Amino acid sequence: MIPRRTILTLVALCAAVVGLQAVQETRRPLGLPPGVTGNVLYVRSPEFMKRAALSYNALLADAYWVRTIQHYGGTKLANDAHKQYDLLYPLLDLTTTLDLYFDIAYGFGAVFLAEQYPSGPGRPDQAIALLQKGLHAQPGKWRFAEDIGFVYYWWERDYTKAAEWFNRASEMPGAPNWMKPMAAVTLAQGGNRASSRMLWTQVLNAADADWLREQAKFRLAQLDAMDQIAALDSVIEAYRGRTGSAPQAWADLVRAGLLRGAPIDPAGRLYRIDPSSGKVTLAPDSPLNPLPDPERPA
Amino acid sequence: MDAIRTEALTKHYTSGFWRPRPYLALDALTLQVGQGEVFGFLGPNGAGKTTTLKLLMQLIYPTSGRAEILGKPVGDVGVKQRIGYLPEQPYFYDYLTAEELLEYFAAIFGYAPAERRARASKLLDEVGIGAERRLQLRKFSKGMLQRVGVAQALINDPEIVFLDEPMSGLDPLGRREIRHLILRLRDRGCTVFFSSHVLGDAEALCSRVAILVNGHLATAGRLSEMLAFQVRGWELVVSGLTEAALQKARALGHVTGAAPLGESRYALELPLTPPPERILAELMAQGARLVSLNPLRDTLEDFFVRHVSGDARARPSTSLGAGGPEPS
Amino acid sequence: MKVVRHIAVNVFKESVRDKVLYNLVVFAVLLISTSYLLGQLTAGQDMKIIKDLGLASISIFGLLIAVFIGIGLVWKEVEKRSIYALLSKPMGRGEFILGKYCGLVLTLLINVGIMTIAYYAVLAYLGWTADPATRTSWPASPTDPAMLEAIALIIVELMLVTAIALFFSTFSSPFLSAMLTPGLWDIGHFNDDLRNLGAVTGSPAAASVARGLYYVLPNFSAFDVKAQVVHGQAVPLSYVGLTSLYGLTYLALVVLGAATIFARRDFK
């Protein structure tokens, strides 16, 4: 059988390998100069790649799509102060050039691109460019037009443009019937909470991915919180009118018979009341933080 | 001390991946070969000859039993220094020339560069490889590779050489040369252990033989003493034999069978007695002319056939799992 | 040990006769033609691209040699039965494995050595012909000796890949080894991700399995300092030393494992 000495040596070497790997783990990783990502995309020209792919365009598009997701997800999760999403747009461009009908790549790609730094590159302009490319390839796709409207609405806060794109979407074949009122509401009321609520409710109903659904739920909870804060503000106003001073705590309002108990936000945290100004805010540890700017509600 | 000694050497192979079944390649082989012997290891294909040689070279490990060469267990590096081995249907690095191959092996034996060249050149002369020795082995025919194989087995002036089917792949001329080579080795005092499935090779060379059938040792000893291979009559071919002379000889019991070969030629079967010279003289007196006279005896094939059928009757469970692939 | 040397030299001879070294011609053509083409296109950045490309090619050509010779090395001897005559010569099976391994490492070293010389020659030429304005934009000298650190680690990495290829070659077919070896190499480059998997996955069982694999699988990503040297970032010698020690220990384990498996094999 295997000699004892050989077995002992093998075991010792195994231990040494694991030990050295543990030592390697503790050492400081080698850095790169700030601003250098080490990300490399060798072929950036979609036109070249399209020719080089021969007949395997769709397959190559899938591969680039997987790489896109890895690049986006990996960068988002990375614990790096200088992280860069520098390959995101070129990869999406390659993917959608290789496969013009890669609908998820347009839709999700736009979401990735528009997301604010550090959760994304914060490039709504690129998101819109990508969707317009999709619309160019498939002119009747109302989803892309709606998504463009969405990017204008949510990230660019350009309600005129948003309404224009919702309107355009509503005229495309198969567009849902709420698209037309959405355009009207957006145009008439700008970015108020009612139109935001409508937008996110549609996203929630139409979402085909869990994370998008979660995102919509989160935004709707934020809108609920903003509605509640507005209501609480008016209660405090009523208290002030009655007593001439701001309430010090929720208990004051309960004693005055204006509230039945201390109010909690949709995430289950107590609202805060600022004793000096009488302003209502979310608890600092509430997961709904930060709420969108109250002056320009989402 | 015996040159080679095996004790109940046994090898099972397992065949089949999902349900491994043992297959008995060699069953309890006990054998001794003395120093200076030329020992023939005979048997049909698949009898276990190559298995035995691989066990002796420790290319495979025995399931049970022991094997020794020159008093040391097989695989001993010191012993390997003193032996040579020709594998069955040898194949060598085809990117080397014959010369380079022999020099490479000589280097492994630890010879100095000048000595390597001298030995390689001498041995290639001896096995009849001429100017081709500077060609890469990929250009070599099967017969030439066989010769190179024999040469490499002798590179260290071994005390024992193991030759697995040394005659295979050779033309009659080549077979004769190898036969002469083996005899020269014997004269030098080298022990030769070779396997073959041809009885004639063994008859011409061996002091002793062992015959292996289906992994069992069927018989071992001197060929001349083996009952199975005693002369049991003669075959006489004559021409110009008249019908009358033939009838007379038959009546006397001097001819037990006759097959006409055409143009008054006959192949006659004669008994052991009276001596064939006498019968021949009688026939020649009646005008017949001698074409050839050969002893009649069992061939190795006859022996195998007889032994296998007898064996099968005597021992119903010859192999543990019939149907496995036969190693050769 | 002399036997090991003879076997090793024979492996090298085989690779030369099988025209393995022709890869060097491809390497040289690739490097020179790209540097010429890039010289026409960009200013300043071309030095970085040539450096990237050169180091990447050294590593990739080396990998191809290590894998494609490594996986056939022992298998071919067994399959073509040339091993029968060889093992009957005075040597142990361990010496055979070690000899084969050393031969392949020798082939690799000579190959990488020649590629390195060609690499530095091209860089020196480009550095010499560049105008002073371009020169100031470079983060490091064209013939920065620090790149030898990256090449040294590439060599240790290739030695480990060779050992792994040889290991698979002792018991499996080249087809299987050709999938397993680069597969392991690939996984080894995502080693850091295995460590971080715990943070991403919800399942503690998966996280601990990933962590276990992180310690056991070869950490090839540690050998990659190409980006650092190209950007003129200092790689401490202690880093090179520790990583090399890790690589050499790992390969000793793998070669001994190969020899142990090989020692028990039957050559049917």
Image (cartoon, coloured by chain):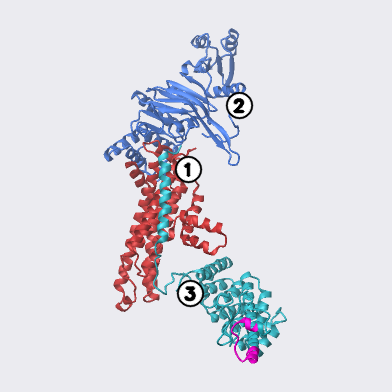
Chain colours: A cyan, B blue, C red
Q: Say which quarter of the image contains residue A33.
A: bottom left
Magenta-colored span? A237-253
Q: Element type at marker 2?
A: loop
Estimate the x, y position of residue A189 in percent, counting from the top left. Answer: 65, 89
Residue at x-position 41% and y-position 62%: C224
Count of numbered circles in the view: 3
Name of the residue lying farthest toward the right: A177
Query: Which residue position is annotated with label 2?
Result: B317
Q: In the image, is residue C238 above or below residue B170?
A: below
* Viewer-side residue, C192 vs B31: C192
Q: Residues within 10 Å of mark 1 (few under 14, many from 20)?
A: few
Q: Nearer the viewer, mark 1 or mark 3?
A: 3
The Cα–Cα distance between marks 3 and 2, rounded to whole angstroms, is: 75 Å
In the picture shown, does residue A100 fall above or below B248? below
State yes or no: residue A252 in magenta.
yes
Mark 3 element type: loop
Horizontally, residue B115 falls left or right of residue B240, namely left
**Residue identified by numbered label 1:** C79
Please check whether the numbered discs 3 and 2 fall on a single chain. no
Task: Residue B201: tell me if it is visible.
Answer: no
Provide the secondary structure element on which disc 1 rests: helix
Q: Is residue A276 visible?
A: yes
In the rendered image, residue B62, in percent from the top left (x then y), is placed at 48, 32
Tag 1: residue type? Glu
Query: In the rendered image, which residue does mark 3 sit on?
Result: A86
Q: CA distance from mark 2 to mark 1?
A: 33 Å
Does mark 1 fall on the same chain as mark 2?
no
Q: Amino acid at mark 3?
A: Asp
